[in-house]
Amino acid sequence: MNGFINLNKPVGISSAQAVARVKRILNLPKAVKIGHMGTLDPQASGVLIIALGRATRAFDLLLKKHKTYMAEFTFGYETDTLDSVGNVTTCGCKIPSENEIKAVLPQFFGKIEQLPPQFSAKNVNGVRAYDLARQGKIADLRPCEVEIYDFSLLRAKDAATFEFNIECSGGTYIRSLCRDLAAALQTKATMTSLCRTKTGFFDIQNSITFENLTERAIIPIDNVFAELNRLDLTTKEAEDLGFGKKLKLNYPIGLYLVYANDEFLGICDVTREYNLKRRV
């Protein structure tokens, strides 16, 4: 069983719990590998990619895909986690107007340096930052380069809460974006809602809920990577690939969807030596 599930994760469960529930619903054998790609916090909802079987090897191929979010930021206070589940650390700060917010949004377009939240899964000398934060310790986190493609104010939900559409690179923390936007406005803010609406191929419009989940929801690997070029092998070449033998192929260097007799074999690299190596 190989492929992906475009799960619409509900609020209230972790990504790991979502994976466990998928495994139970599909009654997967223990031998079938399963995992998620791109963590969503328990209070966040939306697109969570679940990989099955050989698809679990494709994590690095999906890591840099663009992601799109609908987020709500509430101005006037901040929590230690930068979201609504944390403890309030600052309150009574000013509430910006829509025009003030729109005026500073362009500062965040393009490549920016972003400091991850203290309550994050960043690894610091073998320890997760959130574990240190729960002990009252401050992790030595370094800024990371991320890219913001779109950061739009959609509407004001009430006097203090505003809804945004955000398209960004993988690795972007929306909570940090909330914190930094508020800092640019000389105030404080907290992320009070988050829904991931798209990540690469996977769109919330085509996602599946637990209630509707069946094996028919599994998306074939080659459907997800349809932008890659196709490479067709002979039956003998396919057998050699299966036995781990090197194949000399006169194809440009890069990734390919590999087939033999119209059967999908996997995603493979063509290297400088024209060797074909299986990736997925």
Image: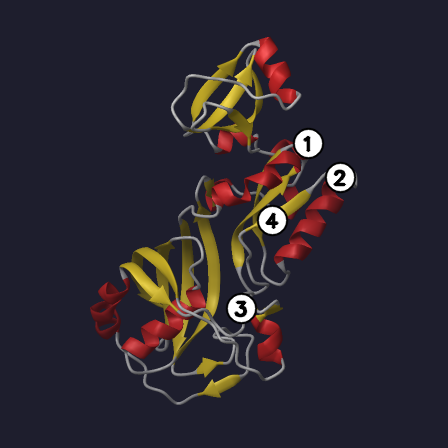
Give amino acid for label 3: Ser
Neighbours of disc 4 within 10 Å: few (<14), some (14-19), many (20+):
many
Q: Position of residue 113 (x, y in %)?
A: 34, 65
Q: In what element is the residue under mark 2?
A: loop
Q: Residue at x 57, y 78 (%)?
A: 133
Compare marks 2 and 1 and give the one earlier in the sequence. Answer: 1
Neighbours of disc 1 within 10 Å: few (<14), some (14-19), many (20+):
some
Q: Identify the residue position indicated by label 1 in the image.
A: 1
Task: Decide which of 75, 221 is in the foreground and name it.
Answer: 221
Q: Identify the residue position indicated by label 4 in the image.
A: 36
Alpha carbon distance from label 3 to label 4: 17 Å
- Specify the label residue 120 is tagged with: 3
Task: Decide which of 205, 111 is in the foreground and name it.
Answer: 111
Alpha carbon distance from label 2 to label 3: 30 Å
Say if mark 2 contacts mark 1, CB within 8 Å. Answer: yes
Q: In what element is the residue under mark 4?
A: strand
Compare marks 4 and 2 and give the one earlier in the sequence. Answer: 2
Alpha carbon distance from label 1 to label 4: 15 Å
Q: Position of residue 97 (x, y in %)?
A: 26, 76
Compare marks 2 and 3 and give the one earlier in the sequence. Answer: 2
Q: Identify the residue position indicated by label 2 in the image.
A: 28
Can you see residue 249? yes
